[in-house]
Amino acid sequence: MNGARYRYERPVDAGTADELRKALAFHHDGVTVEQLDRGIEVAVPDGPSEREIGEMVRHFLRGHREVPATVVTEQAGRPGLSCALPDDDRIAVARGVYLHGPEWTAAMDHVRRLCRERFAEAFGAPLLAGSAQIARDVLVRAGYYQKFPNLVNAVARIRDRYWDGVTVSQLRADQPEALGSFYTPADTVLTPVTCYHVYANAAELKHRYDTGLFAIDGPVFRHESRNHSATRLGEFRMFELVRMGSAEEVAHDYERILGAFTDFFAELGVPHRVVSASDAFFGDAPTMTREAQLLNKSKFEVRVPLADGELSVASVNAHGEVFADSFGLRGLGADATCCAGIGLDRLTYALLSYGLLGTSA
């Protein structure tokens, strides 16, 4: 393979090597991470130099140590299941963005209804509808830019007194760069995480509904520049349960929600395992943050095996005091938070792959 290679000559376990590959693939096509007798070799066919690859790898792995995963459950699924590419009538309109046909829409609606009935209604959680945009300041307060510096999609607005200047119709074919002069940065970005809507509006929600447990369904956008596929999307829908409360209340409901997720996926009959996990952080101190998740068992993923590897379709996440401090929740009696999310597009894809959803669902 042409391109640049970098050899990291320190022990790296298989799980971390795969996380590194996925993180690098956000930005570079064709990345491979090969495990060696000692260390790993990273290859990128086009783009960065060996020095640049080395800087990224060392940053991602700085202070790395192996932390074993915890498997909560592993299910083989209903007897006689086989996995194949699903009937997928989506039409790609941009990288990671699809126009949904009626069959896919029906299947998505069915999965959304299952989540709503099993979690929003069963838990007595008010069901909110998240917006596509969110204030940029919310992401700053949450520390999203520090943890995931490359995933935010910016939103721009047409400049003030737009029609006082040159109109779009007057732009010539040889001056496309002039279009940029009509746009200025806005105070909003596209929403990368639905639970931020709840934290940012916690006081009003608490006042209206007198609870610290909410369900929310909405669109999510993440700029993973070169890593999009049928299941890794630039635009998708997320269903979440979000809990705010005392440390004891949140710890209790974290276990309760994890148990409900475990039962839910077992009843769906899809092959899966529930395992401790970590995010592919690439911001400040990525190794420290990633290992803290694994050691504290503060993140569990539901992973479904497909022909090309496991697909994470859901996760349960404990945040501790981070968002209570970032969003000033302590005055509402909330010292901690947790959330549990289901990627509706991914779960639909997984269930269709095993023939567990019909087009008439």
Image (tube, rainbow, N blue to C red):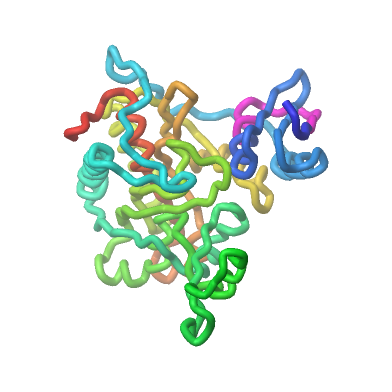
- Viewer-proximal residue among 76 and 249: 76
* Image coordinates for residue 298, horizontal then vertical, percent: 50, 43
Which quarter of the rendering shows the N terminus?
A: top right
Residue 99 inside the magenta-drawn segment: no
Q: Residue at x 81, y 28 (%)?
A: 9
**Which region shows up in magenta?**
6-19
Residue 106 as seen in the image, left or right of residue 276: left
Q: Quadrant of residue 11?
A: top right
Against 134, residue 170 (above or below) is below
- Viewer-proximal residue among 23 and 276: 23
Q: Quadrant of residue 183?
A: bottom right
Against 243, residue 62 (above or below) is above
Q: Residue at x 28, y 13 (%)?
A: 79
- Viewer-proximal residue among 256 and 180: 180
Which quarter of the rendering shows the C terminus?
A: top left
Q: Residue at x 78, y 29 (%)?
A: 10
* Image coordinates for residue 327, horizontal then vertical, percent: 48, 67
Observer able to see residue 133: yes
Observer able to see residue 252: no
* Image coordinates for residue 40, horizontal then vertical, percent: 74, 27
Q: Residue furthest left?
A: 360
